[in-house]
DNA sequence: CCGTAGAATGAGAACGAATCTCAGTTGGGG
DNA sequence: CCCCAACTGAGATTCGTTCTCATTCTACGG
């Protein structure tokens, strides 16, 4: 009934970059900027959005930084809709969470389940996996709905 | 604690096409073929895979058929990874289910939770949504793991 | 302090999934 | 049968993403 890694360093900041450095990356200006921008987000975001905020990071460098951070385990590529990828800090560094997706405006926000609720989900998920011969290593929950702003225009 | 639509016509086949017809679509050869191919799948699949199985359906027609079936509510576009979309029969027609994703070979298979397990998940999910001002209309659970085949090579 | 090898960068080309265009074809209600 | 909107198919087009390659950093040994 375990399996879910205990919630990691919930406090981001410097530790994120240290993790990247430990993975053997040089901490260049672009990489620091990308990590900082992702830390400022409340949900997974797109390369286009990052490009807009990081006007001085050329698009090819942005994508390359993202790719490099993804396989250093610092950033995760999640939840692509309409052929557009979204990026966020990896759960290993930002902690496990679920996603709330507004089906009207498309916004995605992070939501951190209570430990007990998530343990319940993890238990159910592991049972389902086991029943099909899978070994579960994690789960992603996307909650579809309508946000407050979209409900009352 | 409700919110999850009761499981629909679990028996696919003709009813899927009837639903499409009711949405005002002509039941052309390509559309029938696409629906039949999706019914034969055990999980969401790609346009490329469908194209291979439906060798006589040109690629532009395949994509158009998928698009038209998607907004008739018969097919769902889910779970795009690496910029490649995957399609499956919509939950409205195939029933609610979760996905088991092998992180080694990439296969995705459907898994139908027990009603009581899914009610538990739905309850948790609705609480999380409510806490952030969202009205939940559904949830998607992707279980990440390693399949039996990949574990024992 | 250089010098240097290996990393990283940036502008643009290339790629590929998906969508669009438009002239020709279908098919089902009348 | 007829008709006309719906549909088709080949190819062009779009656009997010990745690749290329000449240039610029950067860490490190001498
Ligand atoms: Mn969870
Ligand atoms: Mn469920
Ligand atoms: Zn919204
Ligand atoms: Zn596998």
Image: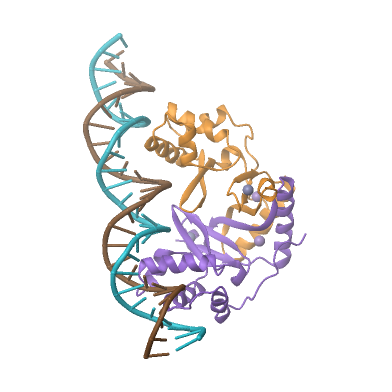
Chain colours: A orange, B purple, C cyan, D brown
Seen as rendered, the residue at the extreme right is B1
Asked if C7 appears above or below B24 in the picture, the reply is above
Q: Position of residue A49 (x, y in %)?
A: 49, 39
Q: Position of residue C20 (x, y in %)?
A: 39, 58
Q: Position of residue C5 (x, y in %)?
A: 27, 28
Occupied quadrant, residue A30 = top left
Front residue (pair A124, A152): A152
Occupied quadrant, residue C13 = top left
Q: Is residue A95 left or right of residue D28?
A: right
Asked if B93 appears above or below A145 in the picture, the reply is below
Quadrant containing the N terminus of chain B in the rendered view? bottom right
| Residue B44 visible in the current orientation | no
Front residue (pair C13, A10): C13
Front residue (pair A101, C9): A101
Quadrant containing the C terminus of chain B in the rendered view? bottom left
Residue at horizontal 64 percent and vertical 53 percent from the top: A143
Asked if A107 appears above or below B73 in the picture, the reply is above
Asked if B33 appears above or below A128 in the picture, the reply is below
| Residue A49 visible in the current orientation | yes
Residue at horizontal 63 percent and vertical 31 percent from the top: A11
Front residue (pair D30, A105): A105
Q: How many marks?
A: 0
Residue at horizontal 57 percent and vertical 57 percent from the top: A135
Q: Position of residue A83 (x, y in %)?
A: 46, 52
Q: Is residue A148 left or right of residue B29?
A: right
């Amino acid at each position: 009934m375990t399996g879910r890694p205990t919630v990691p360093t919930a406090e981001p900041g410097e530790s994120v970059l240290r993790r990247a450095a430990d993975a053997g990356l040089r901490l260049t200006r672009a990489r620091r900027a990308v990590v900082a921008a992702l830390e400022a987000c409340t949900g997974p975001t797109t390369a286009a959005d990052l490009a807009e905020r990081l006007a001085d990071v050329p698009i090819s460098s942005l994508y390359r930084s993202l790719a490099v951070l993804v396989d250093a385990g610092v950033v995760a590529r999640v939840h692509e809709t309409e052929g557009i990828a979204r990026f966020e800090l990896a759960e290993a560094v930002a902690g496990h969470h679920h996603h709330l997706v507004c089906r009207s405006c498309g916004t995605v926000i992070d939501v951190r389940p209570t430990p007990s609720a998530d343990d319940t989900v993890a238990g159910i998920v592991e049972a389902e996996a086991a029943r099909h011969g899978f070994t579960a290593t994690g789960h992603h929950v996307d909650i579809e709905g309508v946000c407050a702003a979209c409900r009352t225009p």
